[in-house]
Amino acid sequence: MRDGIAVVRMARPPVNAIDIEFAAELDRALLSVESDHSGRAVVLAGGSGCFSAGLDLKVLPGYDREQQRELLLTFGRTLLCLYGFPRPVVAAVDGHAIAGGFILAIACDYRVGGQGAYELGLTEVRVGVPFPIAPLELVRAELGPETTRRLVLTARTAGPEEALAWGALDELRPAGEVEDRAHEVAGDLASLPPTAYARTKRLLRKHAISRMEDAVERQQDPALSEWLTPEAAPEAARMLGKD
């Protein structure tokens, strides 16, 4: 906690790749901050050089159907908690934000990006992973249907300047200043009347949150029955082989 701003720092080296345990841990951290009313706002941060590289392609293809379902529900609840968080949440994106990692950033109220050579984007389709409803609704609500269509169906990545043009980032700061600026923005947002902020945020996101709740809490996402395609394992291996 710093000046009433809680920092939730993702810490699964080397790239904050998301598996079942990581998603559950992040969800618990957010719920803990939400229950502690001394925190007036939240900064979501990653490690140096990588916010989050998204789903862990080393373990995901090996998940059986029940584990796939568990990951979908756990990560979906994490996104719901983050997107519907009643206090301001600011992302400090000072490195790669890919696929699920990019969606975590998009779920925040304000996104401060770093200047530099790193990539952001939605690469799920490139590795044979169809989009579940909850993250797709979130991205569409935040970036609009046209930008979402381009990002999802081309599965390409881009640098921070282009992400700023998409509206995926709200501003860019030099490397080393991103987290401090995120704290500053979080403090500014926390100075707003909290009840009005929470109610307005919920109303603004009402439709997307409702669709996300249908998919996750009421388990109406078809991906819960059949998610990963047969292409996922070979494509994940090919992508990992490039690194």
Image (tube, rainbow, N blue to C red):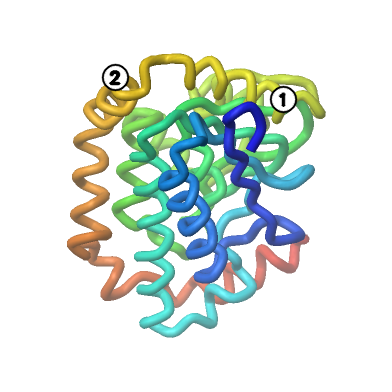
Q: Pinpoint residue 77: horizontal percent, then vertical percent.
A: 36, 57
Q: Which amino acid, by three-letter code, is at mark 2?
A: Ala
Q: Quick one: SS at disc 2?
A: helix
Please tell me which residue lies in front, 28 or 113: 28
Residue 181 at x, y percent in the picture: 68, 21
Classify residue 28 as left or right of residue 18.
Answer: left
Query: Is 206 left or right of 157, judged from the image as shown?
Result: left
Position of residue 200 in the picture relative to residue 93 (left or right): left
Residues at badges 2 and 1 in contact (C-beta under 8 Å)? no
According to the image, label 2 marks what residue? 196
The front one of 15 and 109 is: 109
State the residue at coordinates (66%, 68%): 238
The amino acid type, in three-letter code, at marker 1 is: Asp
- Which one is closest to the eye, mark 2 or mark 1? 2
* Picture quarter with the C terminus: bottom right
Residue 138 position (above or below residue 59): above
What numbered label is drawn on residue 180? 1
Rendered position, 194 above or below 211: above
Kindly identify the residue that appears in the image at 60 percent across and 68 percent down. 57
Q: In this rendering, does residue 16 appear at all?
A: yes
Residue 111 pos. (x, y %): 55, 28
Residue 127 seen from this side: no
Please rate how many residues cluster around mark 2, counting C-alpha atoms within 10 Å: few if below 14, some from 14 to 19, many from 20.
Answer: few
Furthest residue in direction right, as rendered: 176
| Number of numbered discs | 2
* First along the sequence among labels 2 and 1: 1
Query: Which residue is rendered at x = 29% and y = 70% of the image?
Result: 224
Q: Is residue 123 above or below residue 188?
A: below
SS label for mark 1: helix
